[in-house]
Image: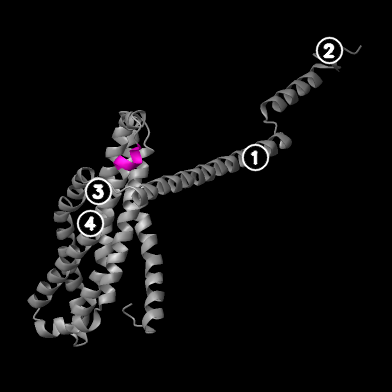
Amino acid sequence: MTNTHRLGRGLCVTDAGQATHVIGAALESAASPVYDTRGSAWEVRVAIAGSIAKLGAAVADRVAELGQFALFTTRMVRWIATDATRWRLLRPQLYEVGVRSLPVILMTGAFVGMVLAVQSYRQFEAIGRAAWSGAVINLSVVKEIGPVLAGVMIAGRVGGALAAGLGTMKVTEQIDALRAMGADPVRYLVVPRFLACFLLIPFLTVYCDFVGIVGGYFVAWGYGVDSHEYWRHSAEVIENWDLFAGVVKSASFGAAIALISCFKGFQSRQGAEGVGRAATEAFVISFIAILILDLFLVLLLRGLYDAIWGEFTIFL
């Protein structure tokens, strides 16, 4: 007589051996993972769509921020064109940007000039043209290293301070108080800072160039380079256009530093962390802007030089 056993859900087996086999197979099936290929593919598509959405949101935020920066710049330029800033507002900014930045600029220029002299002397001395090192040192300082390093130092010292100061004023609602009194914060806070940077950074660059040239000369003189030949070759290579190019670059760098720093200060988030982040972003973006502007200004000034004089030299 056959014994029939029922296992849940109507499953029937005829003996104990078969029941053991069925139960073991069921346990193995329950223990092994079940992959739903349709569910996995759907999760992948959702993840990709989420990544694309995040990227699109980030791009949209950057574009919106660029538009806000353009409007901010337009308001500032309109105030400069229609209403000159007051001296009592401009004077403290001139002192902050110019006088307090001078020691840093002088030290930077002097040591950069000396380092250039140390690096270039051996190369020119090896080919018997040590006196020509002055031309390369001085031209490099006047056209590129002086303006760029002065701009970077101003971005770090002045740009960060501008962003932090304006950010603190926003966090403490001083900017909102100006608006409540019917005053435009851009006119009273941004225009004086912009003019101070735009007007004084070219002078700071000239100081940086001067001490860089003097520092390079003293190092070359210490190596025994003939002073007359050193200055003669420098005078043959450096033109008034080179000085003009350096001043134009530094003025452009000053304008960019002021606009970016003030904008970041106005966009600062609440709290000490927001102010610190605004100062950091102001310096980083200003530094990148200096490098980008330097490239385009070099191309522009080179084309302008060729259009006026019709000449091309390796030093331009």
Which region shows up in magenta?
184-189
Q: Label 1 belongs to which residue?
A: 44
Cα distance in 3D space between marks 4 and 1: 56 Å
Would you say the magenta stretch is mainly helix, strand or loop? helix
Instruction: Report how far apart the C-alphas of labels 2 and 4 lie in the structure.
Output: 99 Å
**Closer mark to the observer between disc 2 and disc 4:** 4
Q: Amino acid at mark 1?
A: Val
**Which circle's residue, 4 or 1, is located before the other in the chain?**
1
Whichever of callouts 2 and 3 sits on the residue coming sooner in the sequence is 2
What amino acid is at disc 4?
Leu
Q: Residue furthest bottom?
A: 128
Contact (Cβ within 8 Å) of mark 1 with mark 3 = no
Q: Are marks 3 and 4 in contact (CB under 8 Å)?
A: no
Q: In whole angstroms, how far apart are the C-alphas of marks 3 and 4?
A: 12 Å
| Image spot of residue 46 (x, y percent) | 64, 37
Q: Tell which tag, 1 or 3, sits nearer the viewer.
A: 3
Q: Is 135 covered by the magenta stretch? A: no
Give the residue pinned by disc 3.
158
Report the residue marked by disc 2.
5
Front tag of 4 and 1: 4
Q: From mark 2 to mark 3, how far is it between C-alphas?
A: 89 Å
Report crowding for label 4: few under 14, some 14 to 19, many 20 or more residues within 10 A (C-alpha): some
- Please tell me which residue is depicted at 83% across the width and 12% down the height of the picture: 6
**Would you place residue 196 above or below residue 202 in this image?**
above
Q: Quadrant of residue 125?
A: bottom left
